[in-house]
Image (cartoon, rainbow, N blue to C red):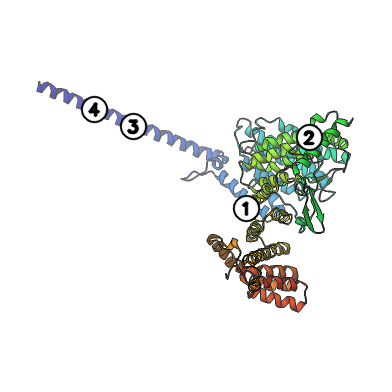
Amino acid sequence: MDLSMEIDEDEDINKLKKRKATKANRSKIDDAVVVASSGKRNIKRIILSVTKPSYTLKRGSGRDMRSLRWEHRNKLRYLLRQLIRRQNWDEASGVLSVLLKGTHRENSLSTNRTKYWTTLALLEHMGSAKTKTRKIHHLYEIWMKKNFAITKNRRWLKGRFDVQLEFLLYCLSQGDSDGAYQAVISFLQETDFTSDPIANLVAGLAFSHLWYNSIKKEMQLQDSLEPSTSIQSGMSGIDHSNGQCVVEVEDSDSAFERDSNTSIRIGKTIDGNRVVPMEVDYNVKKEMQYEELHLNSLESDQIDDSSQFPHTGNKRYGSIFYAHDLENFLMPLKFPSTKELGDFISFQKRIHTDHYKAAVKHLRGALHSTPPAFEALLPLIQMLLFGDQVKEAIEEVESVVQISDATLPFRLKASLQEHFSNEDATKLCACFEETLKKDPTCSHSISKLISFHHDGFYNTENLVEMIALHLDATYADCHIWREFASCFLRLSQCDEDRMSSCVGEGKDSSRKHSKNTPDMFKDNTSRKNWRIRCRWWLTRHFTQTILASEVSSGNVELLACKAASGCHLYGSEFAYVVKACTYLKKEKSREISILKMHVENAIGIYVA
């Protein structure tokens, strides 16, 4: 038994040895075949390099076998970028010519962009305007055909719509409405167009531009800022590098002093510079206005189709027919003034053209795409307001506020609710507070809060905090510093009034000039935060260099307002305050009397 087992084991061992020997022989044979085939390839390469020199450029030479053609193309691209950066157009045209000849079969969107963009830059610096425009159109056509051939079987490539978008924007910038219309119609026929947010955004802006050009002469529309500018002055700018929306709004220094006929001021009378509340219910007055609007619409013969505009009778959202003093970023166009409701609705019927509907459709598609293009929000709100679709505009803003932390949606929400919604003043103040916390540099929001404070809807303590937040981020004008100092003065006077009422008339004279810290600065957390802020502002707003600059500029009003605020922050013996008083006395400025009043009632938060 043992002998048979040993024989079986010997046989198994022999079989394993044979298998290993077979594998080793096979690997040797394969190596020999590989060596032979590589030797044949090397011989073939040598023969091709001798008989066909261009083969060396394609395959390269040496041990690394790097392609010389690839290296030469990279060097040409680098040289082209350097020449364009230095604006050496003559040399750049020669390099571009060589590069175009050597890369006519290139299938990369990015490298093609470099070549065609450089060609466009060269065309901008040569030829007459008419010839240049024709050549640029022709170049864009070649570029788009080239990109179509590259992306024909690769629909997933990112940026395949970029050339069409650039050509469309070029036509709009040149005022070529016909070319823009043909471009956008051709663009809409592209596959997967609706899923591209930027494509929808540009298409929406294009249709809004076409809409404006089609009705501006008929309806005598004008821009809110400049009569000669187009609708794009009110539209948002698009920065393709970071995808951010850029909005600039001009704020007047006296924006918070104007009498705006909004829901906040309805039901008040103006007595000199003081706003006196009247005993009128806001909701009742609003309902009366809209009921009158509805009755007039029934009696007018020109508004049989008023059901197309149901929002004009909505008791919550209202209509632009009743809105006045809309900000320029909300309503960048001036409509023909009319006091007749029938004329207004007839005007609205002419506004709702096919271009208008297409603009709203594509801007809305861009805003609700995945991911959303938030740059479409402002032009969409503007177009909806042009068409008196106030309810839809507020709903769009509300939907964006839920998913975005940007400042613009909150600012739009606050402005729309102020003009069109019958929300109470407390909620409106909360909206502007939230906007200011998102963007402390927003002068529009701080001006609105100051206006609400003057109307009695916003308390002094909250306004002090909001102005301080604004001053943390900006170097404000004199009216902000004046309001800041006035708030401290009111706080100190209110504190003295409470003290006098508590101690009685007999002890009032002994406490008349006592400097007591207001309650809002007595909390440990608040006092610590304000002391840190005051320490920071010593190097931000109240340095000796800034004082010398303000004195040399002769801005007496700003100097007095800052000194008045400084005495409440640092006390009446603060160096900035003392030097400002000395300068104002020397100049015999009328601001010195106001500054003395603040010095006498100075709080001195930092030294308290």
N-term-proximal mark, 2 vs 3: 3
Amino acid type at circle 2 is: Gly
Q: Earlier in the sequence, mark 4 or mark 2?
A: 4
Of callouts 3 and 4, which one flags the residue occurring earlier in the amino acid sequence? 4
Q: Position of residue 219 (x, y in %)?
A: 87, 40
The residue beneath circle 1 is 437
Q: CA distance from mark 2 to mark 1?
A: 35 Å
Residue placed under numbered mark 3 in the picture: 27
Q: Quadrant of residue 108?
A: top right
Q: Amino acid at mark 1?
A: Lys
Label 2: few (<14), some or many (≥20) within 10 Å?
many
Q: What amino acid is labelled 4 in the image?
A: Leu
Dots 3, 4 in contact, CB < 8 A: no
What secondary structure is found at the residue carrying circle 3?
Answer: helix
Of the numbered discs 1 and 3, the one sitting upstream in the chain is 3
Kindly give the residue lying farthest to the right in the view shown: 301
Which of 436 and 71 lies nearest the eye of the viewer?
436
Q: CA distance from mark 2 to mark 3?
A: 89 Å
Q: Which mark is residue 313?
A: 2
